[in-house]
Image (cartoon, rainbow, N blue to C red):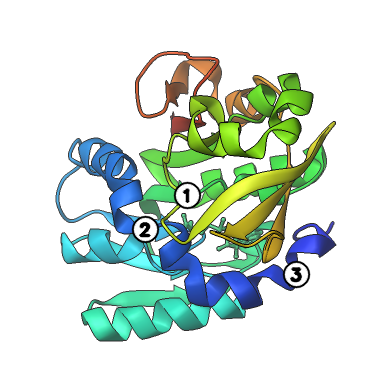
Amino acid sequence: MKPMHSGNYDAGKIMGPIWDQFSPVKVRKDHHEFLFKILKTFPPNIKIFDSCLGSGLDAIPLAKRGYTIIGNEFDENYRKTAKNKINEEKVKIELINYNWLNLNQYHTKTLFDVVLCVGNSICYIFGKEAQQKVIRNFHRLLKKDGILIIDERNFQFMLDRQKEILGDKEKFVSTHSGLNKHFLYGGEKYYPYPVKIEENLVIMGLWETGKTKPLSHFYFYAFKRNELRKLLDEVFGSENVKQYSDYQEKFNQEAGFYQYVCKKS
Ligand SMILES: C[S@@+](CC[C@H](N)C(=O)[O-])C[C@H]1O[C@@H](n2cnc3c(N)ncnc32)[C@H](O)[C@@H]1O
């Protein structure tokens, strides 16, 4: 099983250093409020496993709030950016470096209260078997009553409007909620817009404002409606999975992103 689509291997070299500008803190405001609200339902001294640290955009604010964080980052480029920021901000985050497919080899002394897999990251994993394995590996790291917080872009929205979206970049970059309501990604300088939308594959361009070609690409497994939900239900039990649409606890088929909070019973 491959850890990610080969198209993503070199992307980190470009993305790692500019990640904070592609996902600026102000664009993450709702995302952070959502995380903080959910974490408030736990005692203050909980242990969190951030499965994909990126540049530390979530882990650093959480460490500042006093949570104990283990930060996993598989890509050396993101890891380098995260390390520098962790040092600059003088927070304590233990760093590890696992491919999610091998997380069953990670032995922790105590299990986690929370596992995070956010920022549209599970979509890096292609194929049902590999996706099931990764979700099981996250589940294994949790204590009883611990939660996995995981999200995905609303790819079904893109699959349903493939021609419209690919045919009118300006309209969709500036206006459409399902594609770009500026949750999570899209800063002043860099923004996402797809160059290919097809069955199970969306190639998202990372664009720089004013440039005619994308700087780099992300290759995403485009989950269909309910596809990820079903995988989560299989591992956690459907009664233990709550779905949110752009951080609201309801289903909205035009949402930009879906979030899931999955409790280990
Ligand atoms: C879109 S970035 C998101 C990073 C961060 N969570 C955020 O929200 O900014 C995707 C992340 O998924 C991680 N990733 C993708 N495939 C992985 C795998 N097989 N094992 C471990 N990490 C993986 C990458 O290393 C990267 O950190």
Of pointers 2 and 3, the one earlier in the residue sequence: 3
Regarding ligand 1, which quadrant of the image does it lie in?
A: bottom right
Label 2: element kind: loop
Q: Secondary structure at mark 3?
A: loop
Dot 3 crowding, Cα within 10 Å, few <14, some 14–19, many 20+: few
- The alpha-carbon separation of the residues under discs 1 and 3 comes to 20 Å
Instruction: Give the percent coordinates (x, y) of residue 17.
Output: 51, 77
Q: Which residue is mark 3?
A: 9
Q: Are marks 2 and 3 in contact (CB under 8 Å)?
A: no
Q: Nearer the viewer, mark 1 or mark 3?
A: 1
**Residue at numbered disc 2:** 24
Viewer-nearest residue: 130 or 256: 256
| Quadrant including the C terminus | top left
Amino acid type, residue under disc 2 in the picture: Pro
Q: Which mark is residue 185?
A: 1
Image vertical order of residue 159 relative to residue 79, above or below: above
Where in the figure is residue 115, as x and y percent of width and height?
Answer: 43, 50
Type of the residue with mark 1: Tyr
Question: In which quarter of the view is residue 50 placed?
Answer: bottom left
Label 1 neighbour load within 10 Å: few <14, some 14-19, many 20+: many
Q: Position of residue 65 (x, y in %)?
A: 16, 59
Circle on res. 256 = none
SS category of the residue bearing label 1: loop
Mark 1 or 2, nearer chain start = 2
Is residue 34 visible in the rendered structure shown here? Answer: yes
Query: Which image quarter is the N terminus in?
Result: bottom right
Residue name at image x 34 percent, y 56 percent: 48
